[in-house]
Amino acid sequence: MNQTADVIVVGAGVVGCSVAYYLASSGAKVALVEREAIGSGASAHATGSLSILGAEFSPGASFELALAGYRQFIDLVPSLESETGANLLYQRRASLRLALDEDEVVLIKAMMEWQQQSARIRWIDGDEVRRIEPRLSPDIRGAANEDESAQLDSYRLNLALAQGAERHGAEIALREVVGLLTHNNRVNGVQTTGGDISADMVVVATGEWSSVFGDWLGFPVPVRPLKGERLMLRYDGPPLPVLISSPMRGHMISRLDGLLSVGSTGGRDYDQTAMFATRESHVRPTEAAKLELLQRAIDVFPALQDAELVQQLAGSRPLSPDRLPILGPVPGWDGIMLATGHTTKGIHLGPITGRIISNWILQGQPDVDFDMNPFLPDRFADMTQADFQLSGQRVEE
């Protein structure tokens, strides 16, 4: 069956559903195409942490994008919950970026020097950390204390964005895209297993599968799947009053459903073979990761040696060579834009990406007050080989 739309969004993770949501709510006729199910990729197993303290954001445009993304959730969450009836398990709390050794102290303080220019962050010593949460390890030397960060359930967010897009008229087609409809360097739609869909614009939001579009376009879309695992624990004690992370030990978050999220493994935890293995191996939890994550958690919060393991999640994140998202028009082509490569920050940056891409399509510009050049696809125009090994090793979690 052949269809037509104003915009085709390929990929129904949080990024793709955000693009579809903002386009459809602005009146565009949207076709959201997904080969598996809503949220079947990275969004389904993501932590849902919305913090600017980690090493995934760098000075300049990266940090400005992170700040804009965080602020957008403050209004988006109540709006989505009102529209769809979903409970996104959204919480806003202070957070601690813990240092358990001197290397972490140096790293965190160095990052604070530029983070403090835009966010309310202060250094506190180990004694003050334990006044906030006495159950934390006596080995903690100090922490960056962020006045407010947030966390939500990423899968619930994904489903709510898809439902919201549908309520505004978007049509969801569960079928695989197998090619592009092109003419004279213009993309006019997509070929799918269920027939062609024509449109004035195609948005590629396919995460770890985005590189295939580069093959069709003759332009590099350098995204590779990076493995990650995390745990869900049940602990009988009171929930943590703050959201916790550490450069070497990952995150620890008491969710609003009563479970404790611990994780996650990142590029530093794998050799090259395991880091970029097959997708089948990426979604298969490992005993080694489970033991590593449990030990990290106990190092930070010793009482967790009595916690119950409820679930172990594994999957891939869409890694770009510089760990920055790839956003904007594909050089040499009209009618196609990229919204991919968000690495471990697809949830945090998904809605702001949706707004940027929607504005770009409907208004002719992204409508942001920071430089978009670091995110443009054309930064890879002359790339011959991407060093995913180096970028992957720099991913903390």
Image (cartoon, rainbow, N blue to C red):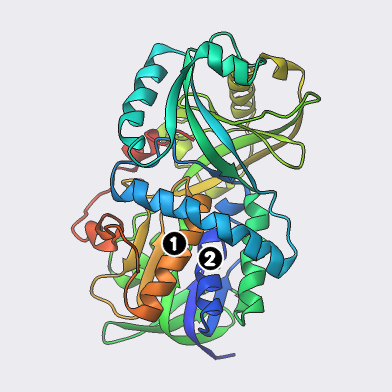
- The three-letter amino acid code for the residue at tag 1 is Thr
> In the rendered image, which residue does mark 1 sit on?
353
Marks counted in the figure total 2
> Residues under labels 2 and 1: Cα distance?
7 Å
Q: Residue 220: percent from the left, percent from the top?
A: 29, 61
Which residue is drawn at the image coordinates 30% and 70% (left, top)?
A: 330
Task: Say if 165 sits above or below 389 in the image.
Answer: below
Task: Say if 118 sits above or below 157 in the image.
Answer: above
Question: Residue 18 — which label?
Answer: 2
In the structure shown, which secondary structural element does the residue marked by tag 2 occupy? helix
Q: Nearer the viewer, residue 206 or 201?
A: 201
Which residue is drawn at the image coordinates 39% and 60% (left, top)?
A: 211
Task: Say if 94 sits above or below 359 in the image.
Answer: above
CB within 8 Å, label 2 to label 1: yes
- The three-letter amino acid code for the residue at tag 2 is Ser
For residue 363, say whether it is visible.
Answer: yes
Q: Residue 60: percent from the left, percent from the top?
A: 28, 46
**Is 159 displayed left or right of 138 in the figure?**
right
Q: Mark 2 or mark 1, which has the lower sequence index?
A: 2
